[in-house]
Each structure stands twice: as C-alpha cells, then as structure tokens.
Amino acid sequence: MISKEEVEHIAKLARLELTENEVEKMQKDLSAILDYFNLLNKAPSPDKILQENKLGGQARKDEILPRNASLTEKIMAAAPDKKDDYIKVKTIL
Amino acid sequence: MNLTELTIKQAHEGLKNKEFTSVDLTKAYLEKIKKLDKEINAYLSVTEDLALAQAEEADRKILTGEFGMLCGIPCAIKDAILVEDQKCTAASKMLENYVAPYNATVVKKLREAGAVILGKTNTDEFTMGGSGENSAFGPTKNPHDKTRVAGGSSSGSGAAVAANLACFALGSDTGGSIRMPSSNCGVVGLKPTYGAVSRYGLIAHASSLDQIGPIAKTIEDAEIVFKTLSGKDKMDATSANFEFRISNFELKGCRIGVPKEYFVKGLDPKVEKIIKNAIKKAEDAGAEIIEISLPNAEFALACYYIIVPCEASANLARFDGIRYGLSGPKGYPAKDLLDVYLKSRGKGLGPEVKRRILIGTYALSSGYYDAYYKKAQEVRQLIRQDFEKAFEKVDMIFCPVSPVLPVKLGEKTDDPLAMYLMDIYTISVNLAGLPALSLPAGKAGDLPVGLQIIGNHFQENKILSVAEQIEKSIKF
C-alpha cells in the first residue's frame, strides 16, 4: 500500500493540490492500480530492444513559420492575466 | 422522408436531386437536438449560427452542380478537437471557457469539403475514460437505454450519430475511445492506423497512441469521411504519407484470425454469442477462420495503463493556469507562482485526470522508471510483435470491442480498475498502432454489440471492404 505521504509527495511533483478526501481516495486507487501493474513482472523481456522508429515522426527544421496576426491575438486573448502583449505571472521567489 | 435518418450517401443524393437543401437538413438536426439532447447530453455546445451560415454557403456551392460527398452534410465534432472561434472544453472545468484560436487539420479538411458543423460533443474529461462518465458536464446517456452509458471517451459523438442528432461525427481514440461508444451505441466507428490522420488541433492525451477517426451510420459513410481526413499534414510530424484508396477485398477467401486469448473468462456470454455469430456469417460467406494466439495479450492492459498516464502527465503539464484555461480559481487566491499551479490544477482537473497524472508522475519518478515505464515499453514491443506474427497468417482479426454490454450509469465509477478492464480488447490495437473498426453485429435485448475488425498497418481499405460485406449479411 502506497503511503499518504507518498501520494502527497507525488501530487506536489505533479503540481496538483489535493484535499484530505482526495489524498485518501488516491491512496486507495493508486495502490490497487500499482498492484495490478505487478503483472508485468511475469512478462518476458524481448530478445533485443528495437529502436523506436516505427511510430514515425520526424523533427522539422527549427524555423519561424509565418502565421496570421489574428492567431497571435487570439492566443494572447486566452491568457488569464496580461499586460499589453505580455503574460503576467505571480512572483516566483 | 425523415431527413435526420439519412446516411451521408443518401443525403448527398437528396441534395443533388434538389429534394431538400443543406439548410433544410441542418435545421432538421438542430430541431432534433433541441428536442432530444436534454435527455441524452451528447452535445456540450451547439453551434447553431455557425451551422446555418455554413449550410447556406454549402447550398450556394450545390447550386453550381460541382460539389463533393460531404458538402452540406451536418456533422458533430468531439469537444477535444479545435473548431476556430468556438469553445473547446475537453469536458473539463479547466477549459470551460477556452475558445479555440484555430481549426484542427481535420476540421479544416471537413470545412474545405463543405461539411456543416452542428456542435461539439461530450467526452470523458481530456478523453480519459471508457464510459463517458468522467465528463465534468455530466455523462452522455445511451440512446438505446438511457439508464446506461454511451461508452467513451467519444460518448457524445457515438450517441449523436445513434440518435440521429448528427449525420456523422468525429471522435478520437487512444485506447478504444472511438470503438467503445460505437459498439455501445450501435454505430460504425473507425480508429485509423497511427499516422493516417493528422492530430494537429486535437487536445493531446497520449501522443504515441492518439488518433482521430470517424463515427458514422454505415461503413460506406465512415469510408467517405476517412478518405477526407487522411493524409500527410505538415503540422503533424507523425502523420504519414498515405493516400487512402477505396478498394474491393473479397470476404470470400479472406483469412480471418480469432485470438484464443480473447475468448476467455470475463467475456459476457451474450456478447460472445453475437460475436461468434458474426464470425460464423463470415465463414458461411467463404472466409477462412483461423485460430491465432497473441501470447502477450494478458500484459496489454497493465502496459497501456502505465504508458498512457506517463504520456498524459507530461502532456497535461501545459494546463498551468498561465497561458490559458482556469487560473487561480475564484475564492482561492494564489500567493505565489507555485500556488497558481497547485490551485488551478487542483480545482480545474477532475478525479480521473488527477489519478492518471499521479500514476504517470509516480511511474516516471526516479527509482520507479525502470520498473514501470521501461518495462512497459518492452512489453509494448512484444505486443506489437504478437500482431506482426499474426498478420503473417491472417488478413485481419475479428474479436469483440467490449467484454460486456453497456453498463448502468454509475455502476463502475467507484472502481477505476474495474473501469480500465473494460478496455481489454481495444488497447492493444493502439499499442501496436493498427487500424480497427467497430461494426454493429447484433443486439442483446435493446443493447447493441460491436464486432471489432483489426487490420494491418494502413490496410483500412481491407477492413472497411470486408466490414461492408458483413454489414450486408447481418440484419437485426
């Protein structure tokens, strides 16, 4: 069984605020799910590990692509807190 | 003639023969949505003004005589896919007021083809779920029995097509999210090969598995929509150079694999009977039925529920209350930056999303990475190899979509593991990146059961062609 402290620690790493009740529920749920994962200990290991290329995907050139100004405006409009064309954040330190 | 009962093909013929206009069609759907959707909850938002404007535009195109199969056809879009200037909530409080700044590539393609967008459909929050009950805005009800789930995560898309609240719909499928609601609601759903359809503009869940695909009334309709959606997109580096061609592949002589590991304890006998009957029909039509083995099938669920939360925990890190979405919720003022993250995510995300982020963070954390994530990746390779071996002997695989009939609303919501177990037949397909569809194969009482047909990579044409022949032979 995963401990309450472990759940709280992971939640902090994941930047999730949990209530007392949530911590308790997650402790129960995560324990059951992690127990189930133990099934994989029975799984064989592949003869050799293939390099992952079958999923496709290529890196594109790191270049600036032209976009409509209206897109920039719409993206900025979605920011919850801003001043002019800057997104405001709370103090870090 | 009831306009909302028409297939894409029939509606297209009607438009061509001037029996009705796209505005007539669109209005018929909008009226039906107003009348029925309070009960079903398939739509999270109805884009009435947009739909009517698009229908008028389509009618002008139709007048010229030159128009494609989807021109003027009303459809619904899963609310995890962006439609420019419309809300896109992913059924989460986090994005309750988020307005999409651009069109997903699939939406752009549908719009270029002249399709009319009726609205955005319900889903499990951030597409995480198999029943539709994880929506922050209430579950979608199964049109065949409103006390039961529609299946998820593309719950609204499945229910909308089944209840004639859209002619077709788009869903997305990370571990069964197109096939499950299609099976539960008695409609056709196609999860394409990984890379066959661009995901640009789909809110990411688990990027090595996510695919967008059609939900429709018939195989022919699904094929029409898939043809429009598929192909390379420069905005999605994982999209493949693939041109879909409709082709005939005869059911007679087709080698159909039936995995012995899938017909075991846990499969509802009512579901098994319907699936076995469909397999028998294929055999009667001249297909060769071959028992196959997927020896690592028993590990698929554990493998999937490690890889998906790991990818999701990274993908959902973007919801931080800074650039968009819920931020420092009212009544919970944040004191510093960390507090903004904690509170925005704590209040904005629902229980299943939190659960998956926690599992993913745990499995990726120092000391656990090898035991969970690395092991799961190895097992994923084994699962893919199982299918490779199977496709040396067979052309396609037949099996159920779900081991059980659509469950009662609330029946499994307290037990996440029991909920995950319902995905047992659909997740391997995503782990291996294969195409698969759900075809209505029969009913147990009022409840539909879907036959799953799995094909080899980029062989959508084969599974669609065979499915169409089976569709004709199964009448219920």
Image (spheres, coloured by chain):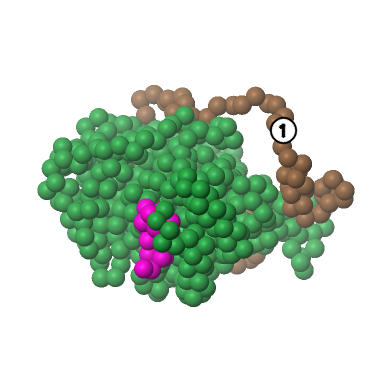
Residue drawn at x 42%, y 26% as measured from the top left: A49
Residue B444, can we see it? yes
Q: Which residue is mark 1?
A: A66
The amino acid type, in three-letter code, at marker 1 is Pro
Looking at the rendered structure, the secondary structure element under dot 1 is loop
B388 displayed left or right of B100: left
**Region rendered in magenta:** B1-15
Residue drawn at x 57%, y 54% as measured from the top left: B57
Q: Which chain is green?
A: B
Q: Nearer the viewer, residue B197 or B340?
A: B197
Residue drawn at x 25%, y 53% as measured from the top left: B471
Percent across and percent down for residue B261 are: 25, 46
Residue drawn at x 29%, y 57% as measured from the top left: B440
In this rendering, the answer to whether B48 lies above or below B318 is below
Q: Chain of mark 1?
A: A
Quadrant (top left, top right, bottom left, bottom right) of the C terminus of chain B = bottom left
